[in-house]
Image: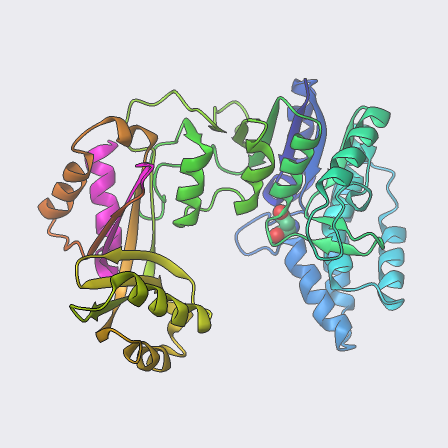
Amino acid sequence: MITVAKFGGSSLASSEQFNKVKNIIEKDKKRRIVVVSAPGKRFKQDSKVTDLLYLLWSHVKYGVDASNIIADIKERYLEIKNALNLSVDVEREFEIIMQNVKNGAGEEYLVSRGEFLCAKLMASYLGFAFVDSAELVKFNYDGVLNEDQTIEAIKSKFEEVGAMVVPGFYGAYPSGEIKLFSRGGSDVSGSIMAMSISAEKYENWTDVSGVLVADPRIVDNPCRIEEVTYDELRELSYMGASVLHEESVFPVRELNIPIYILNTNKPDEKGTKICAKATANDRFVTGIAGKKNFSVFNVTKSVNSDKLSVISDVLQEFKRFGVKVEHIHTSVDTFSIIVNSKDVDKNVFDLLSELKHVQGVVSVDVDNDLALVAVVGRNMVLKPGISAKIFSIFGKNNINVKTISQGTKEINIIVGVQNADFEKAIRAVYSEVVE
Ligand code: ASP
């Protein structure tokens, strides 16, 4: 059985980090496919190579001299090459890249070179084969992953080479032109590798020892989540917990391949396991997440209008304005629609005026400054009285609850509070149900 190990930018930021990666890979012979990001920050004020490459592109595009930026990027790779005594010809690689750009290669090609070069150095350091993702991750011209071709390419390449390092973050169209995933997309590349070879596990190595129960910027020293289900993780990520790229769960969940979030700097710490059926938790809350700055449109309909038609016509207006609806709450003659404030800040008055003209609508008003707090836990469904317990925490702490919603799967309760109460609410829930 094979393990796919993906390393994020901070795990690859310097020769010292490369060394930690090698120790991890050599510790377990099942780690035969290594996926790398581009070198990230070495310290807080440092730049990620990917950001430097975007900056480089904007200079190249407008014909502005970029020799300093090229030198900075090159230096990052030369430090690794020289300190580890590797034979990759970094100077030559840069000449080829800049020549290709001159000949018309686009932004995505240039930006993808961050992971490309990092993978070349890592392959040489580990003694694994370097395989370009352009040969493995195949997109159709409409930008959708061609799963069959991708799986076939990965499987047969892996059978051929036995151990490989692959750059994350990109693949290619049938023409060979490079296509990037969205930012943080190396997580998705790793997941696709794991799916393609039906890996035993997918390890995602980063600079934190797993997923935390709450945001450490809000709660002091929150504890780690030992196990979380794919569904719970999705709810938590959707509500603001930044763990993995959103799309990285899909490829592995069908095959039930567990993902482990692990820390390159503390490889012996246990991390978090993400899987279909988690067991190790008798707490009823797995995690708490949340986001600020939502707006609530409160709509009152006339008593004799058909509720379903009014709701559907109102939603149609949101669609027409291109505004994504996050939640809908309904009661007899009123319903509220919750959206991200930033999605309506430019056209709120136009939207309001259209809504007021919808047949059956009596009045509409908007309430801004709403924050949503999501309490997520697979065990909540098993225990009666959980919502009551959560609301009593809010009451006890003098936090006014503005909206409430609970998904039908009962793995989350979402509570709307004022922006100003957001942090207080998260701390209160954490200290009552987790500590
Ligand atoms: N290097 C890319 C980024 O910074 C992709 C990744 O790290 O996953 O977004």
**x, y (%) of residue 326?**
37, 57
**x, y (%) of residue 285?**
29, 33
Image-based side of 161 in relation to 202, left or right: right
Image-based side of 429 in relation to 83, left or right: left
Residue at coordinates 36% horizontally, 43% vertically from top-left? 216
Residue 429 is inside the magenta segment: yes
Quarter assignment of residue 157: top right
* The N terminus - image quarter: top right
**x, y (%) of residue 395?**
10, 47
Residue at coordinates 56% horizontally, 39% vertically from top-left? 250
Look at the picture and state if 229 lies above or below 351: above
Q: Does residue 336 appear anywhere in the picture?
A: yes
Look at the picture and state if 219 lies above or below 366: above
Residue at coordinates 76% horizontally, 52% vertically from top-left? 113
Residue at coordinates 70% horizontally, 55% vertically from top-left? 143
Quarter assignment of residue 212: top left
Q: Does residue 82 appear anywhere in the picture?
A: no
Q: What is the span of residues highlighted in magenta in the rendered image?
A: 408-435
**x, y (%) of residue 129?**
83, 32
